[in-house]
Every structure is written in C-alpha cells, then in structure tokens.
Image: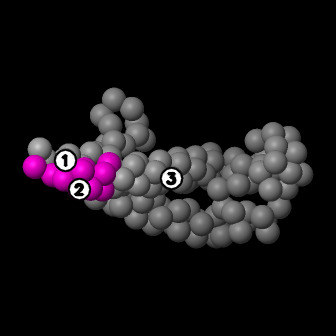
Amino acid sequence: MDKKELQKLKKELLVEKANIEKMLGEFTTENPTIKGDYKSHFHSADQSDTSDEKAHSVTDSEQERAVEQNLELRLREINETIKKIDENAYGVCEKCSSPIDVRRLKVIPVAKFCLDCAKKVKLL
C-alpha cells in the first residue's frame, strides 16, 4: 500500500474512531483509571416500578453493555492500526511477519494476520 493510500486509510480510521467515541459518550462514562475502558450507565429501577419495568431496565442495561464491549473492541483495533501506520509497521502479519496482502487490508483494514495465519488460528 503506498503512502497516499495509507494516509487515506488513516483519515478514514480517525473518522470512525471519532464516531465510536461519540457513540460511547452517549451512554457510557470513560473509566479514569483504565485507558480505553468505558462503563455503561446502569438503568436504575424505581421502587414503584413494576416487575416488567424492572426487567426492561435490566435488559436495557445488558444490551448497552454488549454494545459497549463491541465498540470498545473496535476502538482498540482502530487505535492499534493507527499506531502501526504511524510506526511504519502496518500490513505485517503479527504471527509470521510476512506482508499481509493489500487486497486483504483493503477489505479488513485492521487485519493483524496474513490469510494463511488467519486460517491457522481459525479466524476465517
């Protein structure tokens, strides 16, 4: 991948990162002690709530927690990829150190493994 494509990719990743951080900010609080960790706001049930309302509150909290975890994971992948681009280490398989095929990187920009290694660790 040439420098122009890398810079374009980095810009796209930075936009996605900002969008994810915005989404996380809508229903979580950033953990001050652990970088990159967020805490969902728990939907508190009122004493006067019915059993159904309390159940919905718990369900909403669990759904938000699942979304939070997925967004945190994606954010971590994006941050790692941006760091690799900045350090001129992007596109190298973390397992065998071979170059990752550019076609694979265009489809999965956060790919950490070449196709062969991804198959071996059963990511495909």
**Which residue is tagged 2?**
53
Relative placement, left or right, of 91 versus 117 is left
Q: Quadrant of the N terminus?
A: bottom right
In the image, 3 versus 43, the foreground residue is 43
In the image, 41 versus 2, the foreground residue is 41
| Colouring chosen for the image of the structure | one colour
Given the image, on which type of amino acid does mark 1 rest? Ala
> Which quadrant of the view contains residue 21?
bottom left
Of badges 3 and 2, the one in the foreground is 2
- Contact, mark 2 vs mark 1 (Cβ under 8 Å): yes
Q: Which mark is residue 28?
A: none
> Which quadrant of the view contains residue 101?
bottom right
Q: Earlier in the sequence, mark 3 or mark 1?
A: 1
Residue extending furthest toward the left? 48
Q: Position of residue 14 (x, y in %)?
A: 47, 61
Q: Position of residue 105 (x, y in %)?
A: 73, 63
Say which element carries label 1: loop
**Which residue is tagged 3?**
70
Between marks 3 and 1, how big is the CA–CA gap? 25 Å
